[in-house]
Every structure is written in C-alpha cells, then in structure tokens.
Amino acid sequence: MIAVMDTSLLIADASGAAATPTAPTTPASLLPSAPESGRQPLYRRLADHYQSAIQAGTLVAGDRMPSVRDLMRQHQVSLSTALQTLRHMEEGGWLEARPRSGYFVRQPRRSAIRPVQEPKSLLAIDAGQFVGIHERVSKYIALRQAGAPHIDLSGMTCAPQLYAVETLKQAAMRALRERPELLTSAMPHNGNATFRQAVARRALNAGMRIDTEEVVVTHGCIEALNLAMRAVAGPGDTIAVESPTYFGLLQALENLGMKALEIPTSPHTGISVEALELAVRTYGNIKAVVVVPNLQNPLGCIMPEDHKDQLVRLCDQLKLPLIEDDAYTELADGSVTPSSLKSRDRNGNVIYCASLNKVLAPGMRLGWMNGGRWHERVKMLKFTHTRANEEWTQVTAADFIASPAYDRHLRRLRQMLKQQRERMAESIAAYFPEGTRLNLPNGGVGLWVELPVQVCSQQLFERALAEGVGVSPGAIFSNSSRYGHFVRICCGHPFNRELDQALRRLGGLVHHLADA
Amino acid sequence: MIAVMDTSLLIADASGAAATPTAPTTPASLLPSAPESGRQPLYRRLADHYQSAIQAGTLVAGDRMPSVRDLMRQHQVSLSTALQTLRHMEEGGWLEARPRSGYFVRQPRRSAIRPVQEPKSLLAIDAGQFVGIHERVSKYIALRQAGAPHIDLSGMTCAPQLYAVETLKQAAMRALRERPELLTSAMPHNGNATFRQAVARRALNAGMRIDTEEVVVTHGCIEALNLAMRAVAGPGDTIAVESPTYFGLLQALENLGMKALEIPTSPHTGISVEALELAVRTYGNIKAVVVVPNLQNPLGCIMPEDHKDQLVRLCDQLKLPLIEDDAYTELADGSVTPSSLKSRDRNGNVIYCASLNKVLAPGMRLGWMNGGRWHERVKMLKFTHTRANEEWTQVTAADFIASPAYDRHLRRLRQMLKQQRERMAESIAAYFPEGTRLNLPNGGVGLWVELPVQVCSQQLFERALAEGVGVSPGAIFSNSSRYGHFVRICCGHPFNRELDQALRRLGGLVHHLADA
C-alpha cells in the first residue's frame, strides 16, 4: 500500500551497524508524497522515505538510524523536523530508542502477528438458522449503552474530527441561507435530484452506470438493506450471507421473519463462490445473497477481482439476486478504489446499497441504493416505510460531494485510518497473548482479532465494559458459535496514550481469560 | 368555533332592509380578537364581529350591511379598513354585493351543502381483505408524479409559507454554529435527549405521561406506524382499521404481509366501537386496531370524548393493542386541544404514534412514538430498520418547540387553515353539482367530499390531472369499492383566485361525470 519510492538515495553501511547515507544528500522537501496522501508534512514524508527502505529490506532490523544531526544535514531539515521524524517512526513501531546509542531499526511488532485462520472448509454449510440472534444483539447493545464505556471500540464509526466538519457546516449554512424553505416543504419522492445526481456521478466514475432517476435515497445503508431484502424475499424465505457477517444484517433478517444461511467466507478473499453455488444447488429455496465485497465487516478483506467476476456470473446464471452492501469501499488504502459488483451487472441482478455514514459523515444518516430490476418495488417499499429523506441534509451533502474538497477529505481520512489501524495493531501485538491473530486490512475502520480459542469474547466484552472499554464480541456476527473467540475492534479514533492503555487493559483481560 | 361576542352593539333595523347600527358607536380597536387567533388585524376583528352576528341570527340573509361610510363612522376606522372588512366578508361568502345598492347579508353557500352520509350500517364488517391495494396506490402516486399537477390538492401537506420558516432557519443556524460536530457524530439511539424531552413535555401538557426515556424518534409517523404494527403482529395477521382510512396505512399493511379488516367509521363520530367489538368477537385473530381519533384522515372527524373512553376500555378488556395515529390533533380549531387515547392509557395498551410533519414542518420528517408495553421491542425494531434519526434536525426542532414561538405559530396555522377550509368549501358549494356532500371539519388540512354516486373519482382524478389539478380519489382509502365516488381535497394552500379556478374546473368535471 505504501507507494514504491526511490530508495537509491539510502546507502546502507556495509558493516550493517549504522545506516548512514553518505553523498548525495536529499533535501526532504524534494521527497515525494505518497500519491494517496495529498501534500504531507515534511516529517511524514521523511518517515515514509525510511519506512519504505525498511519494507524494501534496504534497512533491516538492528540497523542504526541516522542520528538527528545526520538527518538535519542530509535532508536539510530543522531540528524539530528531524526529531518529529524519529518520534513518528518510533510510535509507528519502526524504530526503537536505545539509551545513549540512538535509534535502531526494528520490524513493527504487528508484522510478527499471524493472520486469522481460514475456515476449516470453504464448502461446509450450515443449514439456514433462525436462532434469535436479535436477542443476543439487543442484549449486547443494551449492555453497551448502559455501560457507556469511556473508550468505545465497539462501533464502526470514526471520530467526528476525522470528518470535514467545517466544510460541511459551511455547506449546511449555505443551503439554509439559499433555500430555507427546504425545512418546511414536502420532499421529493426518492430523494433530492442534485444529491442523486452527485452520487450517480461518483458511481459512474467507479464504473457503475446508474441514472439519477435510478437512485433511491435511504436512511443509511441499513434501510437500503432492509428494502433490498424485502424487495426480493418474504417472511420464511432464506437469504445467504457471509460468515461472519455484520450483526445488523442478521438482526434485520430475523425481524423480517427471514432465515440466514451462512456461507463460509475467507478472511483473505471473501465469500466462497463454490460454497454459495453448492448451497443454492443443495437448498433450492435461497432468495438472495448479501455480500460486502470490499472491506468486509467484520473481516476487513477485499475480494480479488476474479472472485467478484465469478460471483456476479454465478448469481446471474442461478438467477439469484445479489445484494451488494457498500459502506467502506472509499476507505480502501491507495489511490485505486476496489471495484464494485454492481459495475459488473449487465441485467439488473445486483441490488446496490451504499452508505455515506462512514465516508462522508456519520451524523447525516445518508445512504442510497439502486434496486436493479427490482427498482420500482424498492421505490414503493421506501415510500411505504419512511416516505423520503429530509432534503436539507441531501443538499448539504451534494454540495460537498460534488466539490474537489470531498476527494481531499477522503485522502486525508484514508491516511489517518491507515495510521490508526497500524498503531492499534502494534499495541495489540504488544499486549495480547501468544496465539492472537489478526489481519491488518487494506483499509477501513475495524480489526477482526482471533483470540486464543479458549477465550470467550462475550466474557471479554463484559469485563472490558466494566473497565470502561467497549468492544464487539464475535458471537454477534453469526448464528453459529464459530466466532466465540473473536473480537472486533474499532480503529476509528485517533491513536493516543489513552487508547494504548485501553488496549493494554484489554490485553490483560485476554491473558487472564486465556490462562483461566 | 367562532367565539361568542357581544352583539348588543349591533341593532338591526326593524324594517329588515338595512342593518345600520345606531348609537353607541364601537371603535373597532376595542373589539375582541377571537381567543385562538392571537392579535388580529383590525379588519379581521371587524369582520368577525359581523360574522358572529350573522351566525347568531342577529343579522339574517337579505339584510343590508352598514355602508363603508357607516363602518368608518361607527367603528372609527379608515376607509381602507372598512373596504377590507367588506371585501373579506364577501370573499368568505358572508356578503353579496348588489350593484349600486351596497352589500347584503347572505348565508355562506357552504352552509347549504349537506353532510357526508353515515355508513349504511355501523355493524356490517367486511372480512379482512388483502387485495393488492399497493398497486392501486402506487399507480396513483406514479400518475400524480408524472402528471406534476400545477395545482396539487392530493396531499395532506400545507404550503411551506404556512410554517415558521425564518424562526426554524435561525434555530437551525444556531444549532450548526453551536454544535457543528452533530453533522459528523454518530447519533444517540432512540433520538436526541433534548428533543425527546421537548415532545414528552408537550405530551404531558396534553395529559399523557410519557418519560423522555420512553420516546423513540422516527422518520415521520409512517415509520412509527410500521414499527407499531411490526411490534404486535406478524405476516399473515389481521389488523383492524377505520373505513375509510389513510391509504399509506393500507399500503404499509400489505407490504408487511398483514391483512386489513375495515371497521365502519362514522364521518361524524369516528370508528364504531360496537363494530370493533363485534369484529374481534367474530374473528378472534385480530392483532391490533389502528385509530386516528382526532381529525381522522380522510374523514376529518374528531371522536367524542365518551367514544374515546369506550374505545380505550374495550381494547383494554379485549387485550387488543390500540395503535393511535396522531398527526393532526394540534391542527384542531379553538384553544382546547382534543384529547388523545394515550392520555387514557393505564397499562401500556396504547402505542402512540405522532407526526410533526403537519404541525411543525413537513421538510424535517420528524415523528416520534411511545410503544406502551411493547416499547422495548419498538426500540429494537427502529434500530434494525433505520438506526437513529440525524440529530441536527431534532436539535433545531427542540429549540423551536420549547419556545413560546411554537404556540404562536400553531395558533396562526390553525387560523389560516380554518379560513382556507371555509373558502374552499365555499367554492365547492358554488361549483360542484347538486348531491355533493361534505363535512366541514373542525380543523386539519383536508376535505372529504362525497360526489353524486354515479361519479367515478378515479376518472375524475385522471381528467383533473390532465387539466393540471391533483386530487386523491376515494378508491385508495379502502380495500372495498365503497368510496369510489369520494374525493379528498387538500386545504393546505392559501386560497387565491387560481385555486378558486381550479375548483371551478374540478366542479365542471364532476358535473360532466355526473351527467354522463
């Protein structure tokens, strides 16, 4: 994910003891910014420069970093920039300080942590279950609310300050000044035309051809998912879902009187297309499949492009409606956005459900959808359930989304999230016991952590809550008991000492539960 | 509805030809304002003064009104106020101008129109039907949208300028300035606490004891109704509803896979409690009843207080959940608000669903509910369907609702609606054929008009649309064909010549269809 840079400027000392680049010196101001990061501060560019060298193996663990004085001279930076560079790299786990000797290269601890295990079989399917997950989820939500954890890592929401508060506020003020009657006028069905156009245009850039008229604005992605499932299935019907999957989906399914059939899902490549095919051929009555192809919740994986092709083709052949849940795609690292399933849709078999809660602003509750060949039914269901979204929020969002400021915001957000994920993974690697596994996802807001198998994450949830820390126990992501030793941890908050200490406490509890 | 005034100051001429009050003269500035109307302009108070005299029989049809000069002298008003008074009374149907003779008293035409007929029997019940009303409604909505009528009288929404646009805009700006992070923060479950407190306090004043914690904020009343029905019933279950009833309710029921059992409802006293009891005893499987006790949609009736008592008692005895739909109560004429069913609820059997769309602002899409003894389930269903409402709108609304400006706004709104209803009824009486019936409701936004029985209101709907006028055909308010010759007409727009002409065109079409 970190862009390849010219590391020829770094010449490691042949002795291996000190990596002091000699001539020619490179002014830090000439170092490139990572393409996805916009214009970075000098110390960040300098740190990236050395981190790339470590990743490329030009510098290896144990190498001595150039001293403060070296950095100042070689890169023509101030004392403060040189110090910031070293401190930033130390915080990121790339360097360790040895008293009176300076800084030495080390591999981040997180690189030692092993990845989450693949499912035992990518073909073993549980029959559709319907076991009252909503009680489990409701209990968890009620407990978390009552507990009001001081540090809440249970959601998938970023901290408010990660968003463009001031720009949005200005857009909102503008909307109010120019069109105050939006507050007191009945709303257009299906949403404000300018907002629908703004999201349709972005979808077009992402390879999806969706007319403005074919957009229905919803209250977040969860309403879109509810409408999608109601459009293609009724009570008693079975819907195939990923395993593990977002608990909100399981809860919604149960409340609609539908059954969930969990399809094995790889933490690296996403839903098993083979298992889905087998499931449909075995249990003929599956009415749809819901998939998060990019930055799956909770796994964090992005489906490889050829898996996406296969999935869309299979659903097409089987005439199985494919519901795409797209809440996180724009939070993927790098400058190339992973492709959607919808962009592969040739005959309206994909119902596309998007959320702007994570990428634009959690407080605006905006989502949208295209119902594919069920679009008319989706429109009718939206009308009968919540009519239309208030227009003012949409006008504000459209203003922002259509401006260059939106992409700048997204670049900044992605960069901050990447840093936050890495730092949290570093703390987890430091504080959690042997046997803990996690995948560092290439984007998004969450870490899916596999704890030693004897750890009950519901116990962990309750004890952590008592210590003021909120997490999401694995048990709520499935109707099965398969994820009882997993936990989902939110990386949406800027990393700081308090967060580090919270993870230390959490790690202590995991140690305790693992040893019990 | 018009306050009783001292009419002793008006002394009708014994000859009956001219009603010229003699001494003592009354300065118009000393005339009282109607108590519900706030401070009215002089000409309005003077007009009310004479209108009361007509209603009280002090002045009768054919009497000559005092001349402009008389009015100026007797009430110490300017020429312009005297002229405005006479013109206002003429527009309201209280006076007619005879060339070169002056103004003469007449009964408003609307007083000659007969009321809507009672149902044939208040006990004849149709078995629960399930006949695809949503297709009928969807077709109607699609046609109306495509037709984009220039004058749309099909909704139940007031014109934007009837609301406190400027006050709301200021409140919204304040909220943005003081708490811009509302835009980018995750919302509290169930709604913003200040807003919930504001509506709970108003409910308290209306006799309902609902804690702030027992309020769930919803996207309008329609979401509340959906949640209420899902809380107490499932697919295949039957819900008792008024007949006729709001089409949105029938559509929602069908989309939830539930059946509607229509209970005879009087256009004067509301749902027949006897018929409801009979229905429950006959068809044991009724899961709930949905009632609009005040300003029923489309009938416009307010249930007498003792009927409300009986209804709540019966539902309690039968353990039949009673879902109260309260969208219009605060639009009732007069200074005393009709009571709710919820205010009679002793053990949580009433699920209360309120809308602020009609009273506060249609563009803010705010509703709220209390789930009675199903409140926990309601909260969970809200969470799984649309999570929580965006907070900014609620903060804005709370600011306004808690201020004295809100009651001032409501008084003004009620007064304007009364005037609009009366003027529209006057035009209907003038332009619609013999045999047209309507009740002039004591509040609200709509008129329910019974046309001559041979008129098909769906044909009327289509032809009117072709002429740029939107109305709601009776057929969509029931699964039966009972209301095929009814039409609902919105009175939410300030009356003007264009509206009068639209009703003239509509009347012409009704004539044509009645004669065909």
Image (cartoon, coloured by chain):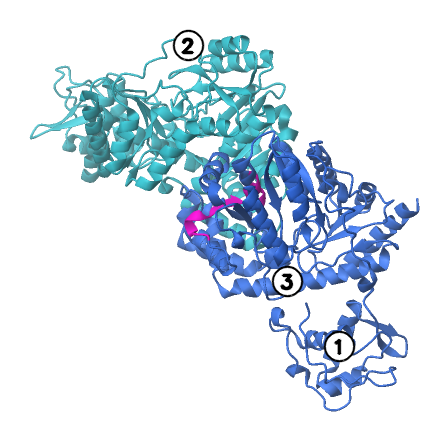
Chain colours: A cyan, B blue
The image shows residue B193 at horizontal and vertical percentages of: 41, 50
Give the CA separation, mark 2 to mark 1.
86 Å
Q: Chain of mark 2?
A: A
Q: Are marks 3 and 1 on the same chain?
A: yes
Q: Judge by depth and name the residue closer to the eye, B6 or B319.
A: B319
Q: Chain of mark 3?
A: B
Does residue B489 show up magenta in the picture? no
Mark 3, other Cα within 10 Å: few <14 / some 14–19 / many ≥20: many
The residue carrying mark 3 is B414
The stretch in magenta equals B210-226
Give the CA separation, mark 2 to mark 3.
65 Å
**Label 2's element?**
loop
Kind of residue at badge 1: Ala
Kind of residue at badge 2: Leu
Give the CA separation, mark 3 to mark 1.
22 Å
Residue sitting at 45 percent across and 35 percent down?
A407
Q: In the rendered structure, find residue B53 and report the number of the disc placed on it.
A: 1
